[in-house]
Amino acid sequence: MKVMLVSAEVDPFAKVGGLADVAGSLPKALAELGLDIRVIMPKYRVAAERAGRLERVLQAVPVAMPTYESGCALDMSYLPDSKVPVYFIEHNDYFDRAGIYGPPGAAYPDNAQRLSFFCRAALAAVEALDFEPDVIHLNDWHTSLIAAYCNLRRLPYATVFTVHNLGDGYQGTFPRSYLDVVGLDLGDPRVSRAMANGQINLARAGLVFADMINTVSRRYAEELRDTATGGAISELIIERGEDVWGIINGIDYGLWSPRNDTRIVAPYDAEHLEGKAACKADLQAEFGLPQDPDLPLLGMVTRLDAQKGLDLVAEILDESDDFQLALLGTGDPQLEASFSQAAEKRPDIGARLEFSNTLARKVYAGADMFLMPSRYEPCGLGQMIALAYGTVPIVRRTGGLADTIHATGSKPNGFDFEDYSTEALTAVIDRALRAYADPKRWRKLIANAFASDYSWTASAKRYQKLYQAAIAKAAT
């Protein structure tokens, strides 16, 4: 089976969020199953820098736009530690910029033009390469127009559309006047289904035109059928019925291993936890927290956003006498100010308002517990990484958090709560603190965390079945 995976970001070449992690790791797991899979993405300035030496494979590829003829070049490299090719679409006017989607905290005003060009150029590159995929795997609204173009042009490719986040701010909405820019015509009733509130909604376009759809956890696929989570888009999810799958993301344990992580102060594993104690002391020092080995330390690596439950955390900061908090992340200016002020006032709160892969690893390794009280969470990778580092997650029971963290049963690996409230958050933290005070119970929780396996192998097999279903549907 031949698959072209299309993504606007791919780790390690360009990363804004979890989408990049998936696009950089899933293809390797699929290649291990024997699929001929390749990846295509824009050649951003940062991608060119991180990729290093690139091979030019196509010098001039014509790209037909709605009202003019454009073009691109195509370079190639490989995903690290693999033979999975990655193609980079070069168009300097659109992609040779300092940001990926825009400057910090903003979006480029021509993103509709940039991303519709990317979609058209990706198809043009596929047609120019000596590689005819059975399936084109699209990721989030940035690539959804490919499903529309394949459908409208009757191209011989099955399409799978993965939605990593369908929150209101992650659907790719543009004014109705942009229909000409993206090359869609309201005369087609399917295009009308892609409209919402008088705007073109590119996530809806993917849901309408793709052969098969999936989101990144079983629970989130169910939640999207409820207007409380899915909002207006839930009607399309319901309409597509069994075409919508939920496949949990995985993590690469070669990249996330406290035994082999060179960015933490000491290695450790399930049988040798001395290094974790050293990592805790190092994390306390990094965040300016008192060096107390016995005081529970909660860690957070997160985007500062109401979706992530940061509003709840901000409200309970005055109740943190029994634990320390180390928070790493950037985002909403008001939340940044709240945590910055709390860190200045309280010695048991540390906040680093930045993004740092090294600091993130220190949090995963050094914290006793990892806090993810998300309002909604399509999948979440942080809780899986925390488990890999023997750090016990505290999560809200939603989306992928509910699918991966189990507070009950024979092998509990964390703590969870249901109601989105400060009272529920305080109560679950109290439960975790009581467990921490029982060394035997806590050691068992750590062992269960280490034993949790969320590698890509099982999920890759599900994707293989999804591709087969897409091929069958496209043939009908």
Image (cartoon, rainbow, N blue to C red):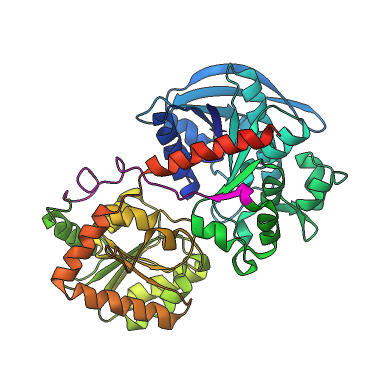
Please name the residue shown 43% across and 63% down the image: 402
- Decide which of 143, 301 is in the foreground and name it: 143
As for residue 107 lying within the magenta part, the answer is no
Give percent across and percent down for residue 334: 51, 71
Magenta segment boundaries in residue numbering: 242-268
Answer above or below: position of 162 versus 131: below
Please name the residue shown 14% across and 56% down the image: 273
Answer above or below: position of 397 versus 42: below
The quadrant holding residue 145 is top right
Please name the residue shown 66% across and 65% down the image: 231
Q: Is residue 94 visible?
A: no
Give percent across and percent down for residue 92: 61, 31
Q: Is residue 460 visible?
A: yes
Magenta: main secondary structure equals loop
Q: Is 347 on the left or on the right of 312, as rendered?
A: left
As for residue 264 lying within the magenta part, the answer is yes
The quadrant holding residue 184 is top right
Please name the residue shown 59% across and 31% down the image: 135
Give percent across and percent down for residue 383: 36, 58
Answer above or below: position of 437 versus 332: below
